[in-house]
Amino acid sequence: MSERESSLQPLVQRFEPYQVERLRQAFPILAQRIYGKPLVYLDSAATSQKPQAVIDAMSRFFLEENANVHRGVHYLSLRATEAYEQTRAKVQRFLNAAHAEEIVFVRGTTEAVNLVAQTYGKVHVHAGDEVLISAMEHHSNIVPWQMLCEQSGARLRVAPIDDAGELQLDELERLIGPRTKLLAISHVSNVLGTVNPIQSIVELAHAQGAPVLVDGAQAAPHLQLDVRALGCDFYALSGHKMYGPTGIGALYGRRELLEAMPPYQGGGDMILSVSFDKTLYNKPPYRFEAGTPNMVGAIGLGAAIDFLGGLDADALAAHEQAVLAYAQEALATVPGLRLIGTARDKIGVLSFVLDGIHPHDIGTILDREGIAIRTGHHCAQPLMQRYGLAATARASLGCYSNEQDIDALLAGLAKVQEVFR
Ligand code: PMP
């Protein structure tokens, strides 16, 4: 074990009570200065920063284990395969799925949704059917369904939200009917921070025989997940939002559903046998993993899950809620600031607009202060339209965010207002 590893190991395990300052030391990038100012990273909803343990696991894979998985009989290939499949089991435990075969590795949430649309959707959604989504979806949980509807002649329906950014459950219930062939909904909104009541939504959908896909991109880094308790049929997540690398994510699918689904892409690894007359497909999850997978990405995702597992989940949630409450109070003191997304149940995403100042100007001025926030439509243009906005500024929190980050944001916003006075 290297010196760095041995100093990190206990760090990850000793977070009771939550020691955010020590936790920050596990993220080397946070020590950087930007334009001579300490980095204030408030863009974790776009992508999270990576702890040293994830970086180390990935470089260790290249240094010691790299070989193609599932194909070789040699030592390194077997070792790489074992590491890759161990991550599948880690994702299974992370989601509390019943079987490791219910976990399909994908590039991320976007690919997971496209996979379900183009396999399950192609088989089950026909002309006259309906796919139901909500008004707060990310484009990656809208466009794949629009594409499916165009291909099949089905209709895309949209459950509305109220001004606070909460789903209108009575309206959702009204929209679910015998034509509904699938309901696709985000667990947590990337713009509003709203946490949707997935369990209740699943009950409503299942009562009408409609399976439910949950977009968990924003939930996975913040909430304790249990797909069996949620009752959902599919659950999608992205590694890079949960302290892991880009280019890797997972799709959970209930075994019976995955087994009945046709392949997504054709190629190596997804087959049992190939001849020019007939190809027999492999069983799930391999049926859906054509080609050499993102092995090092999977290793990094596994390390990220270990990292999250090393934190006390209740303490993490309490810390993130405390910083969110602090931020909401702080932002309420800024003249002319309107918070978009005030749901009762929400996580640390703070979208806002400032009277008379374009969000891009806010982002640019804050950047010169070393503060990273996101501005724009956040890949949720229909949601922006719902609020009559073209864009918002968005500060989003991660496990390493602290009250000093919010103080810096507040000081930065005062500078923004000075410039536009
Ligand atoms: N859904 C939500 C709610 C998201 O926030 C994002 C990423 N911004 C996605 C889906 C897409 O994730 P990815 O780009 O990792 O595929």
Image (tube, rainbow, N blue to C red):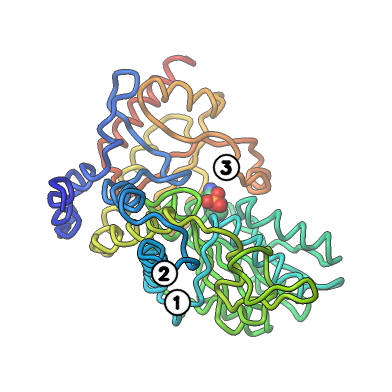
Decide which of 236, 135 is in the foreground and name it: 236
Disc 2 marks which amino acid? Glu
Q: Position of residue 344 (x, y in %)?
A: 44, 59
Q: Which circle's residue, 1 or 3, is located before the other in the chain?
A: 1
Quadrant for residue 146, please give it.
bottom right
The residue at which mark 3 appears reads as: 378
Q: Is mark 3 within 8 Å of ligand 1?
A: yes
The residue at which mark 1 appears reads as: 100
Q: Is residue 126 left or right of residue 9?
A: right
Q: Position of residue 285 (x, y in %)?
A: 55, 73
Q: Provide the secondary structure element on which disc 3 rests.
A: loop
Q: Nearer the viewer, mark 1 or mark 2?
A: 2
Q: Is residue 379 left or right of residue 324?
A: right
Q: Provide the secondary structure element on which disc 2 rests.
A: helix
Disc 3 marks which amino acid? His
Q: Residues within 10 Å of mark 1 (few under 14, many from 20)?
A: many
The residue at which mark 2 appears reads as: 85
Question: What is the CA distance from the residue labelled 1 to the residue labelled 2?
Answer: 9 Å
Question: What is the CA distance from the residue labelled 1 to the residue labelled 3?
Answer: 33 Å
Q: Is residue 257 left or right of residue 308?
A: right
| Number of numbered discs on residues | 3
Q: Is residue 337 left or right of residue 174?
A: left
Q: Residue at x 39, y 50 (%)?
A: 348
Eyeballing the image, is 81 above or below 337?
below
Q: Position of residue 325 (x, y in %)?
A: 33, 49
Q: Which circle's residue, 2 or 3, is located before the other in the chain?
A: 2
Q: Mark 1 and 2 residues: CB-CB less than 8 Å, in contact?
A: yes
